[in-house]
Each structure stands twice: as structure tokens, then as C-alpha cells.
Image (spheres, rainbow, N blue to C red):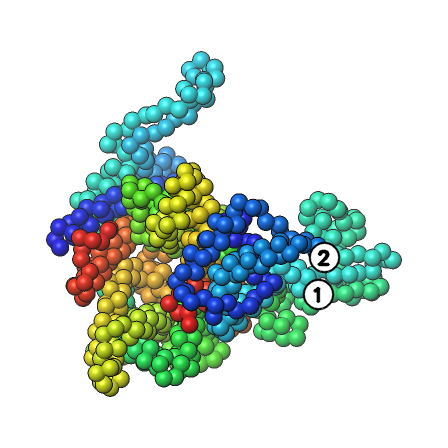
Amino acid sequence: MSNETKPYTEENEAGNQPLADTLVEPSNVGHEYLIGQQTSQPAPLPEVIPSGETVEESKRLAARKAVTQSFWSLVRHQYKKNRVAVYALYVVYFLFAVAILADVLANDKPLYANYKGTVYFPVFKQYLVDLSLDRWSPDLVTADWKDLDQSGDLKSAIWPPIRYSESNEDLENALTPPSSKHLLGTDGIGRDVLSGMIHGSRIALSIGFVSMFFAIIIGVVLGALAGFYGGWVDSLISRLIEIVFTLPIFFLIITIVAIVQQGSVWLIMVLIGITGWPGVARYTRGEFLRVRNMDFVSAATALGFKDARIVFRHVLPNSLAPVLVTAAFGIAGAILTEAGLSFLGFGVPPTVVTWGSVLNDARNDIHAWWLAVFPGLAIFLAVVAYNLVGDGLRDALDPRLRD
Amino acid sequence: MIQYIIRRILLFIPTLFAITVISFIITRMAPGDPAELKAGAGGEGGQRANQQINEQIIKQIRAQWHLDKPIWYWTVLTDEKDNNGDLKSISDRLTFHWNGTQNGYHLWMADVLSGNFGNSYQDQRPVMEKILERLPITATLAIISTFLSFIIAIPIGIYSAAKQRENSKVDKSVSTTLFILYSLPNFWIATMLIIFFGGGDFLAWFPNNGLHGNDYPYGSWMANTGDLLWHIILPIFCYTYASLAYLSRQMRGSMLEVIRQDYIRTARAKGLSERIVVYKHALRNSLIPIITIMAGILPSLVGGSIILETIFSIPGIGLLEYNAILARDYPVVLASFMITAILTLAGILISDIMYSVADPRIAFSKREG
């Protein structure tokens, strides 16, 4: 999948000239995209434009650009018209940034510290220690850097904006409302809520993406088989889709987690993934049914190409657009499911802090409003952002909505 | 048409069979023995004095629930060594053992087919009786919330779609609001409502759990009804808002679809007012997809919502399921799986039938299951 589509999207990053006006018949877009692909196939194209290119080469590149821009650039252009969807995309980027930088944003170790004349970068050193590439010196293994800072042992230190890790328990300060010390308050065992939410974004996003990855792999393979071959393969896979659709998924996942007893993040990812594929499979099947009968596929068949080549090089790239839409909605759904599971106490193990598990704490104490408001807002923000991205993408891909 | 329905119902059989197998095997793979749990719970009072009696009880319970029999019709044994203790060749390691009909699945299925879902592990009462006892509560909530969401959603959808032509700003803001409403996690909203309106540090306008106050059932009829309504306002709100948003979006979408069609243009060209065009010509056809969604609520009538019923402590089927999972009460879990699956399939079938009744252009013979 990535081999086929990536170069085109990268191309679009560079030149995002709106091409909508040049296209007379929007419904042909899929075709043009494909014809371009067919013609560009014989000659392997350079990934990077060489600086001393010949005139002919630049012409060819320009021609390729014009063709390749036609589909994804049009989608981009359409997508950008929807302002809400663009903002939603910014929220998605923001959540990504928070998840990646979680350790730098909230940590009980300083980013930089000068301890007894030695310079440390404790946050980053911990990564190496976790990978067993490095080890702490004996006096620092169990050291509390905050104590060191207060007792003046650190000559200088730069701290992360939030000086708590998500797992720092502090029973003396349990269930404190938001204050200057804990910006969003603490939970039942004194863990900082803001830090928990920052680190929880990692769990939420990884569950969303990994489970959707599983779902897309299963769904695309089964949907492609069903749509391309039809006949008994199709009816068998359609039955399979019906079975998973009919099962009460949330109830099923709770039952399995309760049975396994030791819930883990991976278990949740796998469970959401293997129950989330029917939507993807249905769309892929539909797209394959549509694309299968197009002329270029007949042409490929007439040329004697093998099924695998036809499927992967010709049909699949033209069927992926709706899958992207289901993926965006699926990520939102997976985040919501995980939060719901953790909320009921059936999710990840209690030591792992997720948005849902913080919200679960709010059920135990009706007065702890901060435990409900903030994690819920985070879940909502993530869900609404992915839903809006999916919605915007669907509208952008819908030829009937173009003008 | 009857032929079509029969064919569809026959196609449900393999699906249902697969679902029974999946759910049965999942519940039987569970570590931890419900019989031991049960015997342990019973023996707590006697300090588990007599190990032997306890073991006997476990044996009895296991026999009663077919836990002493193999799960499936056959067992695949993997013996790495033969009787002499020598390593077997790979192909000989797997041996099939045919268990006949004396296996857990067969006996359970035979019971289910004769309408008996077994007895609950927890209190020995028939599962069906427990479910039927809670059905009215869950169904009432589902019916009220469905009714509310339909009567609110349809006008919103029409309004939003009709406004798209003259003032797209109104349409945009309405649909964005609906979208946000749709994305609000109901367990968050429920928790927030309880904290802010259910007697936390803020307002104590509504009770935060159960369906009845202390006076029930001794108050007058009026007082009881009022009490019930007072208790279900928060849950109903949580049940309703998301489906309301979803329905409005569907209604808007289908209205926009219809408004683009030729016969609407004809109606406008005839010089009819926009009002008549929308309400007389477009509305009826745009309702078709909405009608079919109605059948989708069937499973929720009986399944309820595990999360919402747990949060608000509503003694419906969702809470029954939740407690059954916690107590490893597998007969209840299995029965819930079965009933939900059957109703989901029935819902799909009914919506297909309703679709064709509402729209004669759809012929059954051309549709694939």
C-alpha cells in the first residue's frame, strides 16, 4: 500500500496548486490517477529530482506531476475547504506531539542536572537504562531528584514543565483539587492528574493506531478476497462479517478481559483489532466490486498479469480511499472503547494510567469533579478530532460534493 | 417476499451456530472453576471444615453444569511420547478423540433449543426468568429514549437540510453541534451529570442511582410515577443525546439526497413554495432510511447499555450482564450473547423488509443477503 501511494502524497506536499478547476469531470478522477500510474510504470522514476536535469526529464516530471496531483491533491484541496476538519487535524497533530514528548513534558526527573560536578540528562539517560545500554551510578539508582534539588545537591537543573511522573504516588496529597502544585489535582492515591493525562495520551493513541492497524490488515485482506473473487469466497467472508457484526462486541471484550484476568494494553489492542475489521472489510469489498469491472483491470487481465499483481498494483491503490475514512472513524472508536473498558475497570492493569482509568476514579468519589472533567475532555477531544478528520476526508473523497 | 424472508432466516443459521460456538468456547476456556467458586462461597460459613464434603459438592455442581464433560465433539490430544516413553514422530503426535454427544456444547445447545437457558450459577434461578424480570426496565428506557430522539431528530434534520440552501452558516453550525454531540462519550457525560447535578459538591437536583426513592412503593400512584420520572431523567438524557445526534445527521443527509433529485426540481419549477416542496414532496422519501434505522434499536431494547446501567445502578439487563461477568455466571453470559445476536439479526432483516415496504423500487430478488 505505502509503496504505491506514498510518492504521490509526498509530491503533493511540494506543490499544492489547486487543480480542481482544471478537472472538467470530477467522476473521472480515479481513472486519470490510474492511467498515470499505468504509463509511469515502465520507467522507474527517481525519488529525488536531480539538480542538473535535462529538459526532457523536467518535462516528463512535470507531466507526471500534473497526472499525480489530480487525485490526492484534489482531495487535499477539498479537505482544506472544510475549516472544522482542518482544525481537527491540528488537534490530531497536537495529541501526537503530546504523546511523543510525554516524558519531556511530565517527569519526576530533571531534563538536565548538574549533580556533584557531573552533568546528567536524567530523562534521556532513563531511556538508555530502560534499554539496558546504560546504568545509573549506585547513589542515583533510587534517588529522588526532587529531594536532591531541594537539599541543594544539584548545582543547576532544568525541570520539565510538570514535575511528576504519571506513577508517582503521594498518599499525603491524595484527592487534592487543582492547585498551583498539581494543576489538575490528584487522584485517589495522590498521582498527578495532568501527568497521568499526558502519559495517557500515549496509551490512547497507540491503542487507536495499533488496533486499527490489525483491523485494516484483516479487513483489507478479507474484503479484497471477497470483492475480487466473488462466488463462494465472497459468501463465506460475508458470513464472517455478519458474525462479527452480530456479536455484542463491547460485552464480548469485557467477558474476555474478565476471563483472562491479567489485562494488558496489548490484549486490548488485539481484541479491538480483531473485532473491528468488518467495517473495513465491507468497504474494501465494495470498492473491489466497483473497481474490478473497470476497463483498466480488464486490460491488466488481458495482458496476462497474475492475480496478485492485479490486486496489489492496480485494484488496491484505487480502493484504499474509503478505507482511510473507516480508519479515522475506527481510531476514534478504538479510543472510545478502551476508555469505556478502563472506565468499567476492565481495561489495562491498574498500574497503567489511561484517560479511562482516571475517569473511573471519579466514580468512587462524587466530590472529585476534576477526576471527571479533565480526562473526559481529553477522551472527547481525541474522539471528536478523529471523527471530524474522518468526516472531512469522506466529504473530500465524495465526488458529488465537489464544485 | 415470503420466500425471501425464509431464505434470509435460513442464512442466519450458520451465523448463529458460529456465534454459539464462539461464545461457548470463550466462556469454557476461562481459568478458574465456577463450581469451586460456588462451593467455596457456600462453605465459607462452615470455615470450609470438611474438605471431603466440599469436594463432593464441587463434583456435584460440575456434573450438574456439564463441567466434567469435554467442551466439544472431539478432542485433539498432543502426546509427544508413546506408551513406552519414546518420542513419537510429528505426524503421530496429534490424535483425535471423538467424544460423541456427551459434551458440554451439545448438552447446552440441546437445552437452549428446547428453550432452556439453564440456571444461573449465582442463585440457581432459571436464566430466562432473571432476564425476563429485568426486561421491562431496560425496554422502557430504550423505548422512551428512542421515541424522544426520533421526534426531536427529524425536525432538526429537516431544518438543517432546508437551511443549507438559503443560509449555509446555520446548517454548518447545526451539523457541527450534532457531530460534537455524537462524539461525546456517554460514560463521561453520565459521570459529569452525577457529579454536577447528582449531589456532589455542586447541585443536588437529581438522584444519582437506582429507579426509586425511599417512599416507593408506599406512595400514591402519582407520587410513584413522579419519583420514577425524577430518577430516569439523567439516564434518559444519556441514552438519548447520541442517538438523537446520529439520527439528525442521517435525516439531514437523506433530505439533502432527496432534494437533489429531478422530481424536486420539477416541483420547484412548477412554482410550488419551498415549504410544500420540502414537506409534501421531499419529506416522505427522505424518511425511508430513517424508518429502517428504527429496526436497529431492537438489540438495545433488550441489551440495554452495560455502561449506563452500571453508572446509574439501573437494575436492567445491562447491569445483570455486568454482574454476571464479574461473578463468572456463564449461563447468564451465554444467554445474553445468544439473545443479543438473535435480535441483531432480526433487526437487520426487519430493516431490510421495512426498506422494501417503504420503497417499492427495491426488489427483493435483486438483493443479496
- The part of the image, by quadrant, that contains residue B310 is bottom left
- The part of the image, by quadrant, that contains residue A61 is bottom right
**Label 2 sits on residue:** A123
In the displayed structure, B222 sits above or below A340; it is: below
Q: Is residue B167 left or right of residue A37?
A: left
Q: Nearer the viewer, residue B358 or A191?
A: B358
| Three-letter code, disc 1 | Pro
Q: Is residue A352 left or right of residue B11?
A: right
The label number, if any, that marks residue A401 in the structure image: none
* Furthest residue toward top: B84
In the displayed structure, A358 sits above or below B267; it is: above
Secondary structure under tag 1 reads: loop
Q: CB under 8 Å between callouts 2 and 1?
A: yes
Task: Pick whichever of labels 2 and 1 is earlier in the sequence.
Answer: 2
Q: Please identify the quadrant where the N terminus of chain B is shown.
A: bottom left
Label 1 is found on which chain of the structure? Answer: A
The label number, if any, that marks residue A160 in the structure image: 1
